[in-house]
Image: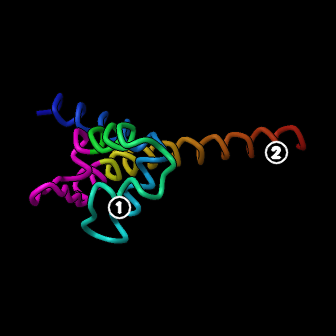
Amino acid sequence: MAIYYQHQLDRTFHALGDGTRRKMLSLLAKRGEVTAGDLGAPFDVAQPTVSKHIRVLEQAGLITRRIEGRVHHFQLQIKPLNEAQKWISKHREFWEGSLDALGDLLDEMSADEEG
């Protein structure tokens, strides 16, 4: 279970690591369900490139596909984003605590130099 979770998290962050894919997700968040053509329209890239981005988003579980005849519709899936947010929040607490401790240490060192 933990290995699957980590693998899924890796795929989510990989998918989010590209600006075009993040913009696609933003478009889906604003519009709800969109067609493949609508999803790729704002970008000046070839259809095979759009398909590659869609495949990465699907593999990460960030979008789902519904086929109606020859038209492919896509919809945002929030669960992988929630899992990524939980991971970030957990690690943010650690770093904030570490940075607070560093700040306290620097304040002490500064006071010792002045005193």
Q: Please give the label number shown on residue 38.
A: 1
- Between 23 and 110, which is closer to the camera in this rendering? 23
Q: CA distance from mark 1 to mark 2?
A: 60 Å
Among numbered discs 1 and 2, the one appearing first in the sequence: 1
Residue 69 painted magenta: yes
Residue stretch rendered in magenta on the structure:
58-83
- Badge 1 marks a residue whose secondary structure is helix
Q: Residue furthest top?
A: 3
* Residue at 37% in and 47% down: 90
Q: Quadrant of the N terminus?
A: top left
Q: Quadrant of residue 58?
A: top left
Q: Residue furthest right?
A: 114
Q: Position of residue 23 (x, y in %)?
A: 45, 55
Q: Quadrant of residue 10?
A: top left
- Amino acid under disc 1: Asp
* Residue at 34% in and 66% down: 29
* Residue at 18% in and 53% down: 64
- Between 91 and 51, which is closer to the camera in this rendering? 51
- Amino acid under disc 2: Ala
Q: Crowdedness of circle 1 by 10 Å Cα count: few (<14), some, many (20+)?
A: some
Question: Which residue lies under the disc numbered 2?
Answer: 111
The correct choice, above or below, for 36 with respect to 53 in the image is: below
- Between 13 and 49, which is closer to the camera in this rendering? 49
Q: Position of residue 61 (x, y in %)?
A: 21, 46
Foreground mark, 1 or 2, reads 1
